[in-house]
Every structure is written in C-alpha cells, then in structure tokens.
Amino acid sequence: MGGKGAMALGVLAGVLVGSLALLALVLALPSASVPASPSPSPSPAVDASASPLPSGSAAAVASPSGSATASPAVASPSAPPSESASDDGFDPTALFGIGKPAPALVLPLADGSGTVDLASLRGKPVWVNFMATWCPSCVDELPIMSGFATRYASMGLVVLAVDVQEDPATATAFARRLGVTFPVAVDADGSTITAWGALALPVHFWVDAAGIVRDGAVGQVGPDLMADALSRILPGVTVTP
C-alpha cells in the first residue's frame, strides 16, 4: 500500500474512534441532565365546620400531614320526654288513672262489722291502700298511715286498707298487732285490685271528694310522699309528715 493509502486509512480510523467517543458522550447525557421529579406537596386540611355533617354520619377529614382521619359521628338529638312521663318512661297518669273517676270498690270489712262502698264515701277524700300481711313494706307503712288518719279525720279524711287474697281473721289480727286505727277490708279473690289495675303490693290511691283519683304510688312510700299526696285531696289544708 502506498503512502497516500496508509494516510487515508489512518484518517478513517481516527474519524471512527472520534464518532464512537461522541456517541458514548451523547448516551451519557440524559441521566446527568434530567432533574429529579419534585415530591408532591401535602393536601390542604379540610374545614369540617364549613358544612354541617348529616345526622348520624361520619366524614373523612384530611390532616395537615395528608393522612385522612375519621371525624366523630354527629348524634341526632333525642326527643324530649313526655311531660306526663318520667325519664325512665314511667307514666303515673296511665298506671293509676290520675284525673279519672276511681273504679268501684265494694268489699266486706275484715272484722265482720259490715261492708265498705267507695261510692257511699263521695264527698270525702279517701286514701285507698292495697296491702297484705306478708308484705314487709306494709308492716312499715300502716302505723304511719294510722297517724295521718287520726290527725286529719276532722278534715273528713277516710283511710281504707284492702287486704288482698287473705282470710279475714288473718287480716284482722295483723291490723290489731300494728295498732291500725282505720277500716280494713278484704279482697278475697283479688278481683278488686285487678279492676284498679294494681300490679304489685303495696299500692296507694288518693281519691278526692268528687271520686277522682288525684295521685298514686306503688311500693313502700315514706311520710313525706304521703303528706304530699294527701295535700292533693285535702285542698286548703297544710299536710305535714
């Protein structure tokens, strides 16, 4: 090969080597020049007070860190209780028939001295107590009731105990032992207490002079409650325990 041929071959080889070097440089450029993607900015917090939550629902509220937390559920307001019923649903008006005429009551007296008829007592306030000799609460209540019967007899008050489903001799002995000063009748078959709607013993009904039930109580009651109930059937009288 002549001198010119060798020179041409050297130039060609140099061009090839330069081209390869330039290609390698171009391939390396993207990884060095492309900047990294910026990290996403946190989501803005949501103002939960901006719109009211539906009753009984829960909404997701974004926190400043971008995580979501559940907001507490909004409870629906409870309905106001009935004016005639207590917080636990007990309705004395329905249970005792307050504001309504007292049911009929015609029973024999335990001592055999005659019969008591509530209708014949119209014009007088009457306190009716259904009881039994086996009832511990009745043992505590009857002496207190005797005190009220004695103190307010001049005001026309009539107190009547009704022994439920026991024989007259048992009821009479019980009343004498406790020093009961008012009449004791006997509801031998329980039909009268059923008619009055009494569910347990003892149970009390306070009936005014017009024959209307003005108050009632079930279970053992103390002198304070007794005095308060008596004031409802003794208008104008200051009743003290």
Image (tube, rainbow, N blue to C red):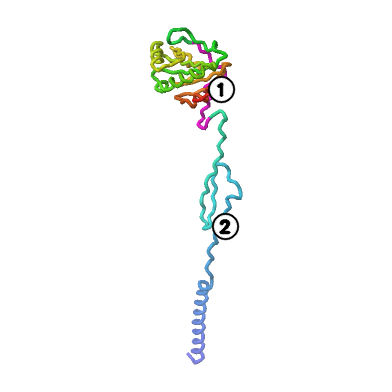
Q: Position of residue 35 (x, y in %)?
A: 53, 70
Helix, strand or loop at label 2? It is loop
- Type of amino acid under label 1: Val
Q: Is residue 224 above or below residue 25?
A: above
Classify residue 121 by image quadrant: top right
**Region in magenta:** 86-106
Q: Position of residue 104 (x, y in %)?
A: 53, 13
Q: Is residue 87 above or below residue 175?
A: below
Tell which of 190 and 147 is nearer to you: 147
Q: Is residue 97 magenta?
A: yes
Q: Which residue appears at 50% of the width and 31% of the height?
A: 88
Say which residue label 1 marks: 237
Q: Position of residue 84 (x, y in %)?
A: 56, 28
| First in sequence: mark 1 vs mark 2 | 2
Tell which of 154 and 167 is nearer to you: 154
The prevailing secondary structure element of the residues shown in magenta is: loop
Distance Cα–Cα, label 1 vs label 2: 72 Å
